[in-house]
Amino acid sequence: MNLSVLSLENAPRFGAPLRFFASVPVFGMLAALILFMDGDQLLQSRWHPATLAITHAFTLGYIAMGMLGALLQMLPVVMGASLPRVEGSATLMHLLLAAGTLSLIAGFLTNLTSLFAVALLLLVPGLGVFALAVVIAIWRAGTAGATARAVQMAALALLVTLALGAWLVSGYAFEALQIERSLTDYHAAWGVIGWILMLIIGVSAQVIPMFLTTPAYPDAFNLRLVYLLMLLLIAVSLFSFAAVTRTVTVLVAALMILYAAVTLYLLARRRRKRFDVTDRFWRLGMLCLTGAGGVLLYDVLVGAQMDRDLAVLYGLLLLAGFAVSLINGMLYKIVPFLVWLNLRLPVLKGQVPAGTRLYAPNIHEVIPARLMQVQFWLHTGSLLLLLAALLARGHWIDAAAILLLLSNLLLLINLLKAVHVYSTYCKARDHR
Amino acid sequence: MKTRHLDVQGLEAPEPLDCILAELETLPDDTRLIVRHWREPLLLYPLLEAQGWQYQTVYDEQARNYQITICRAEV
């Protein structure tokens, strides 16, 4: 198989991943609105419908949306694997994920059973086909690379998460069925530790040295972490005894902290020392991951039994703090890179004579640095206010919601600026 | 055959690709370019093939980087 030819020929055009990326801040704004409407109740319990609604606005609308968009692009270029009919598949998957997530959020907020049924019908094929396609595409490409293996593991974890989630949603959608609340912890563990954390660990081995000029991670470090996490998830799912759960929790927390520490160490040794907003987002994300690991350890070792504050604090640090920060930061690398790549593609493919470097902008000028920095501080401010709201109750939640809204609005504006640069260069090229 | 060296390990994507392509634009036929890169540049290969370059990639275990030799004739 000719891996190199596959890479470029099967990379989707700009519009395919961009559709996913532009939806990310839209769901971020939706999360901010839910926070604004139901903030007080939302922080009381992980079981509150508004808490479930905002959790899925982040996990599906923001995090999965960003990850699917990035994988569409990375599969062919980094892993030499490609999805069949990538353009059409991307359009359909985006539609199913966006509409399914909206239905699920609306279902939690209104408690209408029909909305849960619609969410089930849209999300199961949307995410299920995607995860299966990723597993098969990497297997068929025969890529033995560590990143491809890690992505395959994460896609399998997504399938488990989806199956458990579908079971849970069926309880809401069909009155004849019971809501199996006991499955929630497994659904969350496979989703957050399996799909989200394993994917980030696997992909970071490529993207951190590539975009942030750090030294490489130690040999096979990321893939070993992913395999360990997978084994721990399988162990805790098969043997649900208290001793196993405690041991697995301690080990998962230790691995989280280890990964964050190694990544922070590498980020401190970037070859290029100039200010980089993605570097800041990743440092913030790694601090939040360390905090989330600390909360888990505190729960097990000090025996706090994960009361409501700790469960919400853990979710806040891991989702809004860790995963959202990383995805936000990566968008500022991936989107300018895609603008550059798609403008350069005709040259790269030999369709336009060489020496036409003018056809693509400087990658650092696609999105204004100042606006990205402002957005970083809005994001950091919203996180700090959310933490303050959790500790002090009431007073800070509205301010946190406003900052979260502004942060995502500015992220959307910044991404649209990149689209504007792309279309401006396209027009200039076509007039030559 | 003369040799030119290019180390793109400290550069952030997509600068390595741009640097290599720029270097090739001025590379004489009797000279080979040896590039050091921390990862295998998968995007580069189809471009080299399209432009008629010959290339060979070797992974340096000790230095933990890839050495890509590019020239007009057989490497």
Image (cartoon, coloured by chain):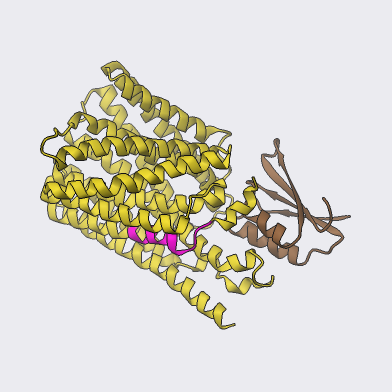
Chain colours: A yellow, B brown
Q: Can you see residue B20?
A: no
Residue A84: image location, x then y, percent: 48, 51
Is residue A17 within the magenta segment?
yes
Residue beneath the point at 27% across and 17% down = A241
- Report the side of A215 relative to A281 (left or right): right
The residue sitting at 48% across, 77% down in the picture is A424
In the shown orientation, is residue B30 left or right of residue A88? right
At horizontal 25% and vertical 47% (from top left) the residue drawn is A121
Rendered location of residue A118, percent (x, y): 21, 50
Is residue B33 visible to us here?
Answer: yes
Q: Who is closer to the viewer here, B16 or A302? A: B16
The residue lying furthest to the bottom in this view is: A431
- Decide whether residue A133 is among the magenta residues: no
Using the rendered view, name the quadrant where residue A194 is placed: top left
Point out the image quarter for the C terminus of chain A: bottom right
Q: Residue at x 51, y 34 (%)?
A: A223
Query: Looking at the image, is A429 positioned above or below residue A168?
Result: below
User: Foreground residue, A408 or A173?
Assistant: A173
Q: Is residue B50 above or below residue B38?
A: below
Q: Where is residue A346 drawn, in percent x and y?
A: 60, 68
The quarter of the image holding the N terminus of chain A is: top right
Q: Is residue A424 above or below residue B51?
A: below
Judge from the rendering whether residue A356 lies leftward or rightward of residue A303; answer left or right: right
Tell which residue pokes out farthest to the right in this image. B1
**Quadrant of the rendered image containing residue A180:** top left
Number of marks in the rendered image: 0
The secondary structure that dominates the magenta segment is helix
Could you say which is closer to the camera, residue A290 or residue A224? A224
- Residue A202 versus residue A85 in the image, above or below: above
* A309 vs A140, nearest the viewer: A140
The stretch of residues the image draws in magenta is A11-23
Q: In the rendering, at what x and y percent does residue A141 appear?
A: 56, 42
